[in-house]
Image (spheres, coloured by chain):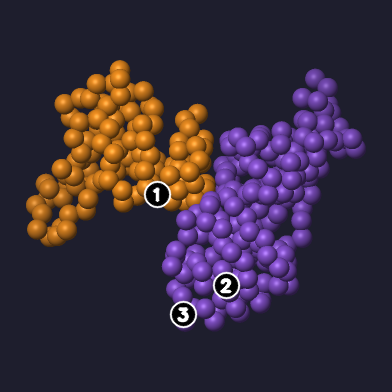
Chain colours: A purple, B orange
Amino acid sequence: MTMHDTRMPDATVTIEDLAPDARFSLRVGADGRAAASETLGLDLPVRVGDVARGAEERTALCLGPDEWLITAPAEAGGAIARAFADLYDRTPHSLVDVSDREVTVRVTGPEALTLMTIGCPRDLARLAPGRAVRTVFDGATVILWRDAEDTFRMDVWRSFAPFVRDLLEIGRAEIAAGL
Amino acid sequence: MLLIHCPYCDETLPEAEFAYAGEAHVDRPADPMALSDDEWAAFLFIRSNPKGVHAERWRHVHGCARFFNAERDTVTDAFVSTYRAGEPRPGTKCSAGAPAGDDMKVAAE
C-alpha cells in the first residue's frame, strides 16, 4: 500500500478556518416577525433555508418556522443585542448570543461538493448557491451555507469541530490522491 | 436510506436528519387522578403496534427541529404521508400489499 502525502500543494479543495462572527439565535412567533424584522433592519425570510442580507453585513437565515440565525461582523453584535433588548417590552421573543457556540470552516474549490458528501446525507447538488440549511455532518449538527457553486461554509459546534475538521482533512487528502 | 418529507421545510430529506418519536395521537387523559392504575398503565405503555399503516411522530432534529406526524406502512416501511403536528390524521387505512391487521386501532380510542 502506497502512502500518500496528505499535504499535496495542488489539492483541488481548500479547507480554512474563518474568523469569528457575531451570531444570534432568534425565536419569535408569526405575529412578532414584522417587529423583529424592523428592529434588525432586514426582512426575516419565511421559507426554511432562505437567507436575507441587509446593511452592515447582517444576514438572517430561516432555520425553522419560528427560528432564525442572525449573523453580523463580530464588532456589530452589541448593537443587535441592544436593539432587541428594547423590543422585549413590546414583542415577546428570544434573542440569544450564540457567537461562541460554533466555529466556522470554509471549504472551497472545484471538488468542494464532493468533499461535503463524505459527511452530509443531503443531496447538496440541489442546495442552491446563496441558501443555507441546518443539517447533519457525520453525526454532528451543522449549519451549512452554500455561498457559491464551489464554496461551502459550515458552522460546527465547538466540541465537534476537531472531529469534523479531521474528517474533512482525510477527505481532502483522499481527493488530492485521486481516490 | 428512507426519504422523509418534512412538512415544515417542505423538502424530502434523508432519514439521517430525523429522529423517531413514538406513536402519534396518543392523548394524555384530561384528569389522570380519575384513572385506575390499569387505565394509566395502558396510556403509558400500551401502543397499537399495527401491521400496516401506522401514525407516528417524527422530529426533524438535524433541520428545523420540529415534531411532525407521519403515516408509515410497517410492512413496506414506505411513508404514506407526513403532516404538521396538530393536524388531524389523513386517515389512510392501508396500502396495496399491506393488509391492515385486526389490531389496527389507535390506543387513544
Mark 2 crowdedness (10 Å alpha carbons): few <14, some 14-19, many ≥20? few
**What amino acid is found at the position of numbered circle 1 in the picture?**
Phe
The numbered mark 3 sits on a residue in which chain? A
Residue at point 57% right, 72% down?
A38
Q: Earlier in the sequence, mark 2 or mark 3?
A: 2
Q: Quadrant of residue B83?
A: top left
Q: Are marks 3 and 1 on the same chain?
A: no
- Reading the image, the residue beneath label 2 is A38
In the rendered image, which quarter contains the N terminus of chain A? top right
Q: Is residue B61 visible?
A: no
Residue A130, x across and y down, in percent:
68, 49
Closer to the eye: label 3 or 1: 3
Viewer-proximal residue among A42 and A18: A42
Q: What numbered label is drawn on residue B67? A: 1
Residue at point 20% right, 39% down?
B106
Q: Is residue A50 above or below residue A25?
A: above
Q: Is residue A112 above or below residue A41?
A: above
Viewer-proximal residue among A91 and B36: A91
Q: Are marks 2 and 3 on the same chain?
A: yes
Residue A123, x across and y down, in percent:
60, 35
The numbered mark 2 sits on a residue in which chain? A
Mark 1 crowdedness (10 Å alpha carbons): few <14, some 14-19, many ≥20? many
**What amino acid is found at the position of numbered circle 3 in the picture?**
Arg
Q: Is residue A65 above or below residue B20?
A: below
Compared across the picture, whether A95 is left or right of A53 comes to: left
Mark 3 lies on a secondary structure that is loop
Residue at point 50% right, 29% down?
B1
